[in-house]
Image: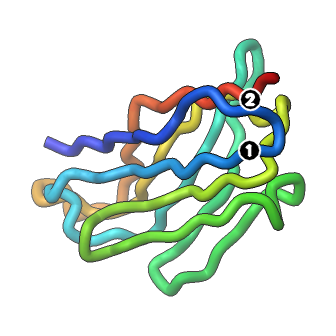
Amino acid sequence: QVQLVESGGGLVQPGGSLRLSCVASENIFSINAMRWYRQAPGKERELVAAIDIGGSTNYVDSMKGRFTISMDITKNTVFLQMNSLKPEDTAVYYCNINGRARLNPRLADYWGQGTLVTVSS
């Protein structure tokens, strides 16, 4: 019933930009926070950026100034604008939403299946 769909990944040269989108199903009617994670092959999943319902954002230091997270609550959508991309940014990027679903009044985390970002010359 709850589905998150990421899009916008692809192949980009170093220094290039990509904009990722994540659309959550309408079953999530109350969103507490939206987050982006990423995971490179052989490495642990790590937080990239987060935004809460009040609009406060949080970034990992290495992403701050290059990545921007934003959201459109009315459309259950979160974005990640990525600029000045580096090869080290290559990973599968996952959308995460903390919120309440129609049949689950408790706050819970919901995950997308990921979108691949490859930064290479």
In this rendered view, identify the residue nearer to me: 52 or 19. Answer: 19
Residue at which label 1 appears: 16
Q: Amino acid at mark 1?
A: Gly
Q: Amino acid at mark 2?
A: Val
Choose top left, top right, bottom left or bottom right for residue 117: top right
Residue at 76% over, 21% down: 43
Q: Are marks 1 and 2 in contact (CB under 8 Å)?
A: yes
Indicate the quadrant containing the C terminus: top left, top right, bottom left or bottom right: top right
Residue at 13% over, 42% down: 1
Q: Is residue 3 above or below residue 19?
A: above
In this rendered view, identify the residue nearer to me: 68 or 94. Answer: 68
Q: Which mark is residue 83?
A: none
Residue at which label 2 appears: 119
In this rendered view, identify the residue nearer to me: 58 or 63. Answer: 63
Percent x, y for residue 15?
Answer: 82, 44
- Callout 2 environment at 10 Å: few (<14), some (14 to 19), or many (20+)? many
Choose top left, top right, bottom left or bottom right for residue 100: bottom left
Percent x, y for residue 53?
Answer: 45, 79
| Image-based side of 82 in relation to 98, left or right | right
How many labels, in total?
A: 2
Residue at 39% over, 37% down: 112
